[in-house]
Image (spheres, helix red, strand yellow):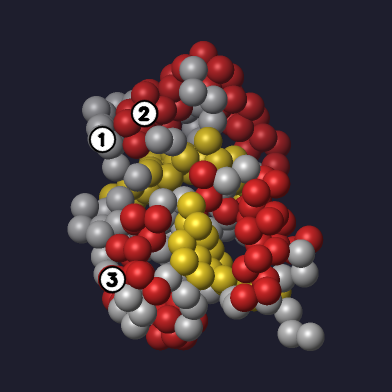
Amino acid sequence: MQKPILYLIPNTLGAQSPIEILSPSTLKSIHSLTSFIAENAKTARAFLKEAGHPVHPSGMEIIELDKHHKNELEEVLELLAKKNNTGLISEAGMPCIADPGAEVVNLAIKQNFRIVPLSGPSSIFLALTASGLNGQQFIFHGYLPVQSAERKEKIKELDQELKKTGFTQIFIETPYRNDGMLQDILNAASLDIRLCIAASLMQDDETILTRKISAWKNETYEIGKRPCMFLLGK
């Protein structure tokens, strides 16, 4: 018996059309599906329309991830496995990385799905490749603590980890807290390490800057409420 397939569907990082960003093979796989799991049904429908999906939204099944508990998702996947293949749509970039879709994949593996990741943009790797920092060895930490005092302690830990291993330290923040994060980095990190700020990746206002902390402290810079990656390295 053929295994059901869960396709991991990447999204764009901003206002670009999926047709411009995603490969023909990725779009072909998306167009073959009518069942999807997503964080938000409305944005998923908009994405599928922009991706040129041939089926009218009324003919699609979109299950909202945040409206189902783990046990309900298990039941949903059981039903989907009996029907057809399914797509897991990210809100931005690749699914499952700093993304709740990871739990869906874990459950799908347990239910004997074949997992097929589709190619698309990843802000982590776009930032890393353009940073000039160590791309051989790196750690992605996701979100740091929200409170400033705890966040600065975590930044100091990453600073020490960087000095000990040489591994690039990568993390993200909710856009409205970007400038607070930047100030905490400048207050907590050593002057001789480098910070890369990669904001609005693949957008018209894209900014990728890598400088020593000492240089960052000599100027006033505002990231604003833009999607941003932070990277610390040597």
User: Callout 3 environment at 10 Å: few (<14), some (14 to 19), or many (20+)?
Assistant: few
Nearer to us of marks 3 and 2 is 3
Q: Nearer the viewer, residue 138 or 25?
A: 25
Query: Residue 50, labelled with which disc?
Result: 3
Question: How far separated are the C-alphas under marks 1 and 2?
Answer: 9 Å
Query: Residue 224, labelled with which disc?
Result: 1
Residue 127 visible in rendering: no
Rendered position, 62 above or below 1: above
Q: Which residue is mark 2?
A: 177
The kind of residue tagged 2 is Arg
* Left-right relation of 217 to 159: left
Q: Residue at x 63, y 58 (%)?
A: 76
Residue 60 sits in quarter: bottom left
Rendered position, 57 above or below 174: below
Q: Quadrant of the N terminus?
A: bottom right
Q: At numbered mark 3, what does the secondary structure look like: helix, strand or loop?
A: helix
Looking at the picture, how far across and down is residue 161, in whole percent?
Answer: 67, 35
Q: Earlier in the sequence, mark 1 or mark 2?
A: 2
Looking at the picture, how far across and down is residue 4, in whole percent?
Answer: 68, 76
Rendered position, 20 above or below 76: below
Q: Earlier in the sequence, mark 1 or mark 3?
A: 3
Marks 1 and 2 in Cβ contact (< 8 Å): no
Question: How far separated are the C-alphas under marks 1 and 3?
Answer: 28 Å
User: Callout 2 environment at 10 Å: few (<14), some (14 to 19), or many (20+)?
Assistant: some
* Left-right relation of 198 to 86: left
Question: How far separated are the C-alphas under marks 3 and 2?
Answer: 30 Å
Q: At numbered mark 1, what does the secondary structure look like: helix, strand or loop?
A: loop
Nearer to us of marks 1 and 3 is 3
Q: Residue at x 40, y 35 (%)?
A: 174
Marks 3 and 2 in Cβ contact (< 8 Å): no
